[in-house]
Amino acid sequence: MNKQFTQKTKVIITGVVAVLAVIGGISSAMSPPEETNEVSRTTTTEAPTTTAEPTTTKATPTTTAAPTTTEPPGPTLTPSQEQAIRAAQSYLDFTAFSRQGLSDQLSSEYGSQFTVEQATHGARQAGIC
């Protein structure tokens, strides 16, 4: 309709727009939206409701001495170990891995580039059986 462009120019512009639309559709189809991942990881359940009438009881005061022993603190993780665990969980959210496959991916130069020790720790702590 626009006489400013020739027929050949119109065909080229239409082709470029179509190619860009296809590329955009493919790239969005390959990476699912973050909302979908969050919904699939969380579930909620409702507690059953009861219609029984409430009962009242008198509370009897009790005195209990606080325990004097304390639990030793759990093992502290290095920042690298924490990052490896988060990366392992992220990979598992995307696809399934064996423990060795996940460890290899975490330590790969094309993956997350963790040390073998950090990658092994991350795979182990990510919950793979």
Image (cartoon, rainbow, N blue to C red):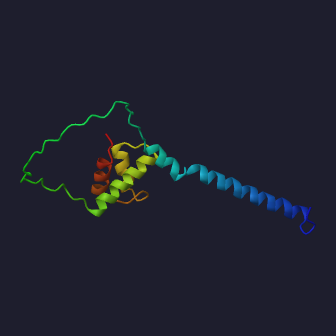
Whole-percent x and y of residue 40? 47, 43
Seen in the picture, residue 4 relative to 99 is either above or below; the reply is below
Answer with left or right where residue 38 lies relative to residue 18.
Answer: left
Residue situated in front as seen by the camera: 41 or 110? 41
Residue at left offset 87%, top offset 62%: 8
Question: Is the C terminus in the top left, top right, bottom left or bottom right quadrant?
Answer: top left
Answer with left or right where residue 62 lies relative to residue 85.
Answer: left
Answer with left or right where residue 28 lies relative to residue 21.
Answer: left
Residue at left offset 7%, top offset 53%: 69
Whole-percent x and y of residue 39? 48, 46
The answer to which quarter of the image holds residue 24 is: bottom right
Residue at left offset 33%, top offset 43%: 128
Answer with left or right where residue 109 lies relative to residue 33.
Answer: left
Seen in the picture, residue 128 relative to 55 is either above or below; the reply is below
Q: Is residue 115 visible?
A: no
Residue situated in front as seen by the camera: 98 or 3? 3
Q: How many marks?
A: 0
Q: Which residue is farthest top?
A: 52
Q: Is residue 39 visible?
A: yes
The answer to which quarter of the image holds residue 11 is: bottom right
Question: Is the N terminus in the top left, top right, bottom left or bottom right quadrant?
Answer: bottom right
Residue at left offset 66%, top offset 55%: 23
Whole-percent x and y of residue 100? 34, 45
Residue situated in front as seen by the camera: 61 or 120? 61
Whole-percent x and y of residue 38? 47, 49
Seen in the picture, residue 87 relative to 49 is either above or below; the reply is below
